[in-house]
Image: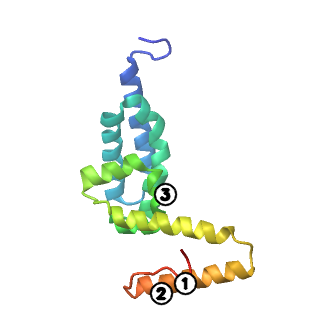
Amino acid sequence: MPAGRGDACEPCYWTRTCRKRIIIGQAGITTKALREAFGEFGEWLIRTTGPHKAALKINHFFSFFLEIDQAWSRIPSYSELLHHFGAEGLRRVRLPMRWLHEEQGVEPDHQAKKIDSEKRRIKACLRSMPSASLSEKALHAYWQQLETRIEAGKRPTPPHDLH
């Protein structure tokens, strides 16, 4: 036994530590179903990544489950998660998303994720323009025109003078 671990070997120490952190996290979740889901995720994380990594990462993922608890009080669909967190936010919680897919049947929509990422990049480009400039106004007007066409179910076409 390593020094300071008492009567537990290394894997047993980290498994026990992770399970304690899971229990503490569950106390902060109000919905019974999500408390149970967080516990199931924690056990899955121990099996999937090993007890040491799981113990170090479980608190990081707690905030994801807490936000789900506060927003829905249930496990939401992929489109609800994408709308709330965005593709970038979901990339930060890859392991919980993998668990949701493998264990809860939450099916990722890769096309919707791609569209969300593209919109985020476009918005970043729009924000990079000097505020209240003519180019910023023109670009925003064009973006609005494209958004309107997309919402109407039409495919956006590039301006004729761009090559």
Between 31 and 156, the one lying in front of the other is 156
**Quarter of the image containing the N terminus?**
top left
Query: Looking at numbered disc 3 in the image, what kind of residue is underneath it?
Result: Gly
Q: Nearer the viewer, residue 29 or 149?
A: 149
What amino acid is labelled 2 in the image? Thr
Q: Which residue is mark 1?
A: 144
Q: Residues within 10 Å of mark 1 (few under 14, many from 20)?
A: few
- Foreground tag (3 vs 2): 2
Q: Earlier in the sequence, mark 3 or mark 2?
A: 3
Q: Which mark is residue 148?
A: 2
Mark 2 to mark 1 CA distance (whole Å): 6 Å
Q: Earlier in the sequence, mark 3 or mark 1?
A: 3
Q: Quadrant of residue 16?
A: top left
The residue located at (60%, 85%) in the rendering is 141
Residue drawn at x 35%, y 65% as measured from the top left: 111
Residue drawn at x 26%, y 55% as measured from the top left = 104
Q: How is the image coloured?
A: rainbow
Residues at discs 2 and 1 in contact (Cβ within 8 Å): yes
150 is higher (above) or lower (below) than 32:
below
57 sits left or right of 79 in the view: right
Pinpoint residue 4: horizontal percent, then vertical percent.
50, 15
Q: Where residue 23 sits in the image (x, y, percent)? A: 40, 43
Judged from the image, the secondary structure of the residue bearing numbered disc 3 is helix
The residue indicated by pointer 3 is 89
- Is residue 27 positioned above or below 106 on the image? above
Q: Nearer the viewer, residue 27 or 47?
A: 47
Question: Which SS class for mark 2?
Answer: helix
> Could you say which is closer to the camera, residue 96 or residue 72?
96
Seen at 37% across and 23% down, the residue is 11
Which circle, 3 or 1, is nearer the viewer? Answer: 1
Residue 76 visible at all: no
- CA distance separating discs 3 and 1: 25 Å
